[in-house]
Image: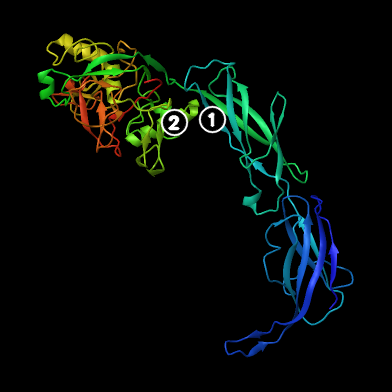
Amino acid sequence: MVILAIVTLATAQQLQVDSVLVDTVWNSDSSLYNNMGIAYQTRYSRDLYLSFKPMGGGTAKCYVAMSTDSAKTWAFPADSLIELDSGISSPVQCDVKCRVRLRVLGQDRPGVAFKVTAQQWQPVLSGNPQLVTMGLFSAITPGDSCHVNMQCTLDNASQGLGYSTISKVWWDAFGTAGTWSDSTATLSYTWNTTVPTGASGQRRAMIAKARDANGLWSAPCTLTVQFVELTKSVTMLSIPAGTFLMGDTNAILLNQGSLSSPLHSVTLGAFTMSQTLVTQEQYLEVMDTNPSFSKSGKTYPVESVTWYDAALFCNALSKMAGTDTVYAFTSVTGTPGAGCTGLGNLNIDYTQNGYRLPTEAEYEYANRSGTKTDYYWGRNYPPMTSADTLAIDSNAVWFNDLPTTYDSAYQEEVTIWGTQPVATKKPNAFGLYDMSGNVWEWCNDWYASYSAGSQTDPTGATSGSYHVLRGGSYYEYFANIACNLCAAFRVSDGVPSSGSRNIGFRVVCGAR
């Protein structure tokens, strides 16, 4: 048998295969044997090692062809060649010697020759249109500058093709000068652009092209960005430092189970608090999900969130704002953002300036907004007159004032249960909406009994079974609903791993 080694070039990619050598040739018995060890088909063959080295950068897909005639008709005859290892069926590293074991069936034949062809494909990029929600932290104006993170992916590996390492990516925003960036695995670029006229629904596009180490270009990949505007941004209000009496001495209120005694002095540093409850639109923008039981609309409060979901939202919001996160943990159980039931080794670092849930003391202080009455609108519990009830109607979303509809089957007006859009009632003296009513609100603290001593910036018990809920909601329709709306009222049944259609939250951050 005569073995010839031939060096060839790849077609479009111009990859050279160098150092093609036949290392070893020997006779081999390829006869087929039964389970008794008796040959039932006698065959002759030659085994050999074929060595080659694809020249270039990255990886290449290599192929072996064989010729058995003087005309050099190249083919890969399945009945005449057996591939004994996978070196030629998967991409191999360029500039590295590759060794493939082959078996040629049949007796000696003159003129048998092999050639190795290396092929590389141009990079294939893909990217999906992006939806960019502007105005999460403040209102936007067309022409305002903004930053958009553009990303595309390299598809070669998923197609199983040989490819070279990407060395450069060309980012070209239509109408502006293009920019080179050194390639990384993420193939990402921060686009400094402006909000287009009209803002909501407007589109902008840029193209990305990749060049590999062998100088091959990908086809242009067009990345589209659509700008939409939030109905309501996350507006943070400054809450001044101060000292107040936390709790209540109203005997009737205490008999309703407010758990808010003894009265004690609390001093707090300044902080900021979101003007409204976190809305479904805001939660969807940050967490990419909306777990609310009643998906009533963008400006309705998000609900059915666990305490852990709320903590994860705070961390995600901190990252979007470029501030340090407050909640540190090592693992997540459940579905993050839509049913998270635990955060492993959770630690709350109050020294960080990121977003978090309010402490119970911060919530009551912000709710009271300088008042000393049971309700922040200047009245006490219980409501005794129609004027008292009207005052609640003007300041809180509660069962007594929910919208109604006519039920023709029963020929009567019936109450439509559910949350209402945020900020539909009057704000308190600090400018905060829905501090009483609409939905209960998660606080950071574990529930524990009060002590009579003075406190400064308290953060509650270090452990427990329940987190404190504050503010009352639309859902309580029993006789004591009016007491649930009082500034000092607290409940102790906030299971942190459980959400409810009448529990939401707001966020705080800043100096404490």
- Position of the C terminus, as image quadrant, is top left
Across and down, in percent, residue 401 comes to 23, 18
Left or right: where does residue 9 sit relative to residue 328?
right
Q: Marks 2 and 1: which is nearer the front? A: 2
How many discs appear? 2
Up/down of 250 relative to 178, above or below: above
| Quadrant hosting residue 127 | top right
Left or right: where does residue 428 sit relative to residue 272?
left
Up/down of 508 relative to 83, above or below: above
Query: Residue at (36%, 16%) from the top-left corner?
Result: 270
* Circle 1 SS class: strand
* Circle 2 SS class: loop
| Marked residue nearer the N-terminal end (2 or 1) | 1
Up/down of 65 relative to 168, above or below: below
Residue bearing mark 1: 131
Q: Quick one: label 2, few (<14), some, or many (20+) residues within 10 Å?
A: many
Across and down, in percent, residue 126 comes to 63, 41
Residue bearing mark 2: 325
For this orientation, the residue located farthest to the right is 70
Of 76 and 320, the residue lying toward us: 320
